[in-house]
Amino acid sequence: MADNIPVIVWRTTPDGKADYFNKKWHEYTGLSWDESVNSTAQKVLHPDDLDITMKVWKECIEKQQSFESEYRIKRWIDGAYRWHLVKGEPFKDEIGNIVAWFGTATDIEDQRRELERKDEFISVASHELKTPLTSLKGYLHLIESEEYLTDETRSFISKGNISVKKLQHLIRDLLDVSKIKAGRLEFSMSPLNLTELIHSCIENNTYMFPSYVIKEEAAEDVFVMGNEERLEQVVMNLLNNAVKYSPGNKNIIVRVEKNETSAIVSVIDFGIGLSVSDQKRIFERFYRAESNKVSISGLGIGLYISSQIVKEHNGQMTVNSKLTEGSEFSFLLPLTNNAQ
């Protein structure tokens, strides 16, 4: 069966030593059986990807958790390195001991090239849109400063400013996506009071969405090392999503907790929820949940950007959800001392 599917299939011993590859592997790499089950197999990995891949693989073995990575594998027929999405799962016996690792490697070279072209277009288009949008905002401000305007005209200008602000946020998000993919999402870090930041975000959303009841459950003085503007962007995105996807139940809970090493922020809504399949992909860029039947505008990049910001803070973002019952989005950050 493994020899007749169009992806590479592999298996290792519990300690991570390869002991099986399917026919696709040998056809793609040109390696013999003996070469494939010893360190020679590492030679087909791109040199720039080898160290980080082996580090992630060893960590997964030690923690007995699923392995997932993207790296380039050399094709023997032409010497080309092509990107592959490699996944592995530990299989355990009835008492919880790992008996083997099974995994696949899927060629994603063509998909990555399409995404790179899309990223390039997004970057160029976003920069080109900034200039006319700035001019439009300036002209609206000049018109608004005129004394002899009717109430109706001022109302139109106000609505125009709201639309301009939405476009500015959209362009900012698109530029952030470009920066993330280029490895240029950089920001300064300093100790900050996460509890105060959360309180400020809740206050802002209370004014923005007066019909919603946002309950704050926050531990006092939770300090983390972070960038206030970027972490505010994460929290505001989670709160805005909670509002958008909870048209029926207008109760939202924001919780700030801490343990010995970490701060945990959770935004909980009681809205339409997510399926299990959507939860697995919700932090991918441009992914939009399809399991719910509610049509809501957006590009599917807010959660991707938020998860990458949290990652840059040495943290992690998670989701726990059930369809029709609601969602809980959480992010975890390392604690720091407020005295720094």
Image (spheres, helix red, strand yellow):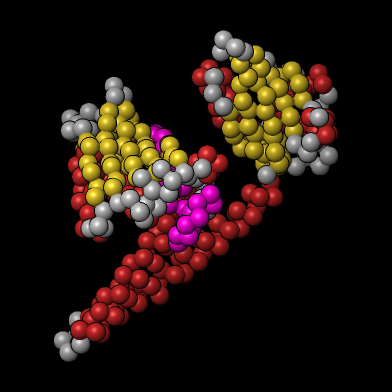
Residue for point 34% across, 42% down: 268
Q: Which of 86 and 41 is in front in this view?
A: 86
Whether residue 65 is situated above or below residue 170 in the rendered picture: above
- Residue 274 in the image: x percent, y percent? 47, 44
| Residue located farthest toward the top when viewing the structure as drawn | 95
Span colored in magenta: 290-318
Task: Examine the structure image and report whether residue 317 is included in the region drawn in magenta.
Answer: yes
Residue 325 figure quarter = top left
Residue for point 26% across, 75% down: 158
- Image quarter hosting the N terminus: top right
- Image quarter hosting the C terminus: top left
- Residue 45 in the image: x percent, y percent? 68, 32
Q: Nearer the viewer, residue 251 or 142?
A: 251
- Describe residue 5's horizontal placement relative to residue 265 as left or right: right
- Describe residue 165's horizontal placement relative to residue 77 as left or right: left
Task: Examine the structure image and report whether residue 165 is included in the region drawn in magenta.
Answer: no
- Residue 137 in the image: x percent, y percent? 31, 74
Q: Which of 125 and 169 is in front in this view?
A: 169
Total tally of numbered discs in the picture: 0
| Residue located farthest toward the left when viewing the structure as drawn | 147
Residue 21 figure quarter = top right
Is any atom of residue 187 visible in this view?
A: no
Residue for point 80% across, 33% down: 24
Is any atom of residue 172 visible in this view?
A: yes
- Residue 34 in the image: x percent, y percent? 81, 18
| Residue located farthest toward the bottom when viewing the structure as drawn | 148
Residue 39 figure quarter = top right
